[in-house]
Image (cartoon, rainbow, N blue to C red):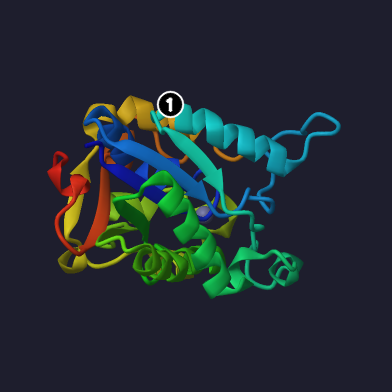
Amino acid sequence: MTTTIVFLHAHPDDEAIFTGGTMALLAAAGCRVVLVTATKGEEGTPRFPLPAGESIADRREAETHAAAELLAVDAVRFLGFRDSGVAGSDAQDHPLAFGACDVEDAADRLAAICREEGADVLVHYDPGGIYAHADHLQVHRIGALAAARAGIATTYEATVDHEYLHFVDVHLVEGANRSLESRKSIGLPTAMISTTVDCRAVLETKWRAMAAHASQIPDADPMVPPEQFADVYGWEWFVRHGPPGPIDALPS
Ligand SMILES: [Zn+2]
């Protein structure tokens, strides 16, 4: 029987940056991969002017579908919330702001999607949200609650290895939002990580999926020279809860 894995992410491009290699490897291993994105990244600033009539949400939705296709994702769902933006912005007060949404209601929505998709496994974020963006913190809370409600025994929290300095020093954390403070609080210590995935076999696919988010990420990541891309993005990290699942079976 095919194993179905649902990934919950906060914004378009998070799936490619943090779990793109794992998604591609799972699909290649015969799993059914479903991407649920909580928001459409409405607060992202496009790198170029969009055509008249096209909103940033439209653009980022299309980019999400393009990235998902590259990663061989079987289904893309949006949870229907709005990007909360950076701390202190007006976006945090929007009635649909994900970071301030009702956790119970959002968990019910996600649990319903998990049931519809026949989810065996759910992937969300570590308790620190990988880093402390309001929407990322919410992914952890809602993911954990939805898994319990949908009766999903195996969950993985996506994270980064805080001690893997290649990643912490240079990786892209939503561009302008990056600050020294957020770098310090990114990810988890090595000792807390249960599962490391070696994504180097699908690195070009991951690069293309990141580059599909062209409104946000120029040529995948201009801060990382091509020869260093594998050093920075070649591994993905998770904390598993419950019995071993399909991510444990991937190359490590
Ligand atoms: Zn994000």
Q: Type of residue at label 1? A: Leu
Find residue 3 and report its horizontal and vertical position in percent: 26, 41
Find residue 136 and report its horizontal and vertical position in percent: 49, 63
Q: Is residue 171 left or right of residue 30?
A: right
Residue placed under numbered mark 1 in the picture: 70
Closest to the observer, 51 or 8? 8
> Split into 4 quadrants, where in the image is the N terminus?
top left
Closest to the observer, 223 or 150? 150
Find residue 42 and report its horizontal and vertical position in percent: 69, 51
- Which residue is found at the position 18% from the left and 54% from the top? 195
Find residue 61 and report its horizontal and vertical position in percent: 62, 38
Q: Which quarter of the picture shows residue 84?
A: bottom right
Closest to the observer, 120 or 187? 120
> Split into 4 quadrants, where in the image is the C terminus?
top left
Closest to the observer, 98 or 86? 98
Query: Dot 1 surroundings within 10 Å: few (below 14), some, or many (20 or more)?
Result: some
- Which residue is found at the position 46% from the left and 27% from the top? 69
The answer to whether residue 220 is seen in the rendering is: no
- Which residue is found at the position 55% from the left and 64% from the top? 135
**Element assignment for label 1:** helix
